[in-house]
Image (tube, coloured by chain):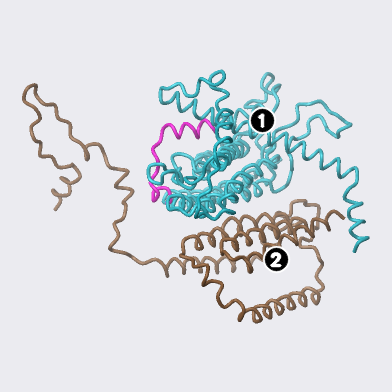
Amino acid sequence: MDSLMGQVWAEVLTLGNLWWVGFTVVCILLVAVPVLLGMAMTTWFERKILGWMHLRHGPMYVGWFGLLQPFADAIKLMTKEYFIPEKSNKLMFLLAPVMIFVPALLAWAVIPLGPSPLPAIPELGLEAGAQMVVADINLGVLYLLAVSSLGVYGILLAGWASNSKYPFLGAVRSGAQMVSYEVSLGLIVLSVVVLAGSMNLVQIVEAQRGMWFLIPAFPAFIMFLVSILAECNRHPFDLPEAEAELVAGYNTEYSSMGFALFFLGEYIAMITMSAFTAILFLGGWLPPLDIAPLNWLPGVFWLALKIIAVLFFMIWCRGTLPRYRYDQLMRLGWKVFLPLSLAWLILTATVVKIYGNFGV
Amino acid sequence: MIQYLLFWLFAGGMLGGAGLIVLGRNPMVGVLGMLLTFVHAAALFILLGAEFLGLLMIMVYVGAIAVMFLFVLMTIDLDFGTLREGFAPYLPLGLLLVLALAAELLVAVYASGLPKEVMIVNGDDVQNIVQLGRVLFTDYVVPFQTAGLILLTAMIGAIVLTHRPRSDVRRQDVGMQIFRAKVDAMVKVSPAVGAGVKPVHWTPKSVAKKAKKS
């Protein structure tokens, strides 16, 4: 046994393996740090856009145009007291915010960021047009759905562990909501997978070289946009945190960084779902037209632009629509979106069977 | 070799999770242990080259079934003290059951002489979802469809058993709400200067229509 363990360690701790682990850690940081920064800027973006929609200025005192406001908020939240209610379940109370935050960030492992704009560096094993993605797996779509379905646990546990009525009601609502909309979300994604003929996110984007799936799958795109609002607990479906009825929903008892982690998780989930929309329907990192001045820009730029466009849509909805009633939300999910997305999947499958898909 | 290390890690995590289910004092800890078990089982599937089964495991068991468990546990009134009663008398029976099941499984695995891989990769198709689909819809199409029909029957049965018409509940008529027009809800008056608003006896148009019909 001893020698076996030694053998295992000798084979695991080789220079090649260590190099691979180090390189992967750098890759993860290269994706995670911009996402976290993007999340901070999304809060600023949301407050600024909402401000303008309300004929206000929005944040404008910290930094130019209030650009440093998110960092000021972060410092404020970090220095506040972390309060744990006496009657709460301590372990789960502390675990819940982490369980929201981690899956939201995990999803970024499979999101392709486009071909690398850097020149080839043979010493590092980098090719010129290599795809920038932490893990290029064949079932990227399924991985994204699986990871995004983990987020519901954080909310459910937060509500339960707080041992308080309002957070509990918020958590139950949110759980029901996220599980219901996952069904139609999965069916819509499946119709896009049928259209592209692959579950690999890179190949789904490559299949859109001729035409973005926005055009052939327009009804699915609309349903997807509405579903991601519900999946991220955003307006007009933000019933879990309906402040008028539930005080604040599942996060009522949280303070300081625990409270901030919920928002980190929510905003990262928003960015993740926007990126998912961009990849499935808006051509990912591809420029709108494959002509000279547009395709000079690196793919990451186009992907970021599309993510921002979808984020704007989400914030726009928040500024425009009143909150749905709970029974309306459930009715929309189960009685409207589920049959419609199922019908769309069958229609897409039939058409693909007759005319073939966009596969590469 | 690194696979062995990962296997020990995942198998250990799975056993730890299973231990939590049985030994956790709080049923919520039990559900968390179940989560741990499912995720590690999915990781083992992926390690065996069956990434589709692994991700499906997370989606179905973690994303739906365990959520349902959590829901039920959250909404029932639990008394943690009485839950632990009678643990000792049932322990030998439980252990016996576990041993019997484990023995059956081991005998089945060793007697069948099956290859140890979960997915048998053949052909040049790298995506095992394609291979799985090919097998499911050719060789096993009848059992597959039958399983689907059985599940559908179970679903309809559950709905029929639990659904009962209730006359004491007021329901929302969404169609009526959507097609409610401005003329149904408000009346505009322009009072003469100095005269004030005269009382208007006004019935909404929809009500008036109904009254006319009957």
Lateral position of residue A110 relative to residue A347, left or right? right
- Asked if labels 1 and 2 share a chain, the reply is no
Q: Position of residue B70 (x, y in %)?
A: 54, 60
Q: Secondary structure at mark 1?
A: loop
Residue A47 included in the magenta stretch of the image: no
Alpha carbon distance from label 1 to label 2: 40 Å
Q: Is residue A314 above or below residue B84?
A: above
Q: Is residue B98 above or below residue A198?
A: below
Q: Is residue A23 above or below residue A154?
A: above
Q: Amino acid at mark 1?
A: Leu
* Front in this rendered view, residue A174 or A206: A174
Lateral position of residue B61 relative to residue B166, left or right? right
Lateral position of residue A90 relative to residue B97, left or right? left
Q: Position of residue A66 (x, y in %)?
A: 53, 22
Q: Residue at x 73, y 78 (%)?
A: B104
Q: Position of residue B122 (x, y in %)?
A: 81, 58
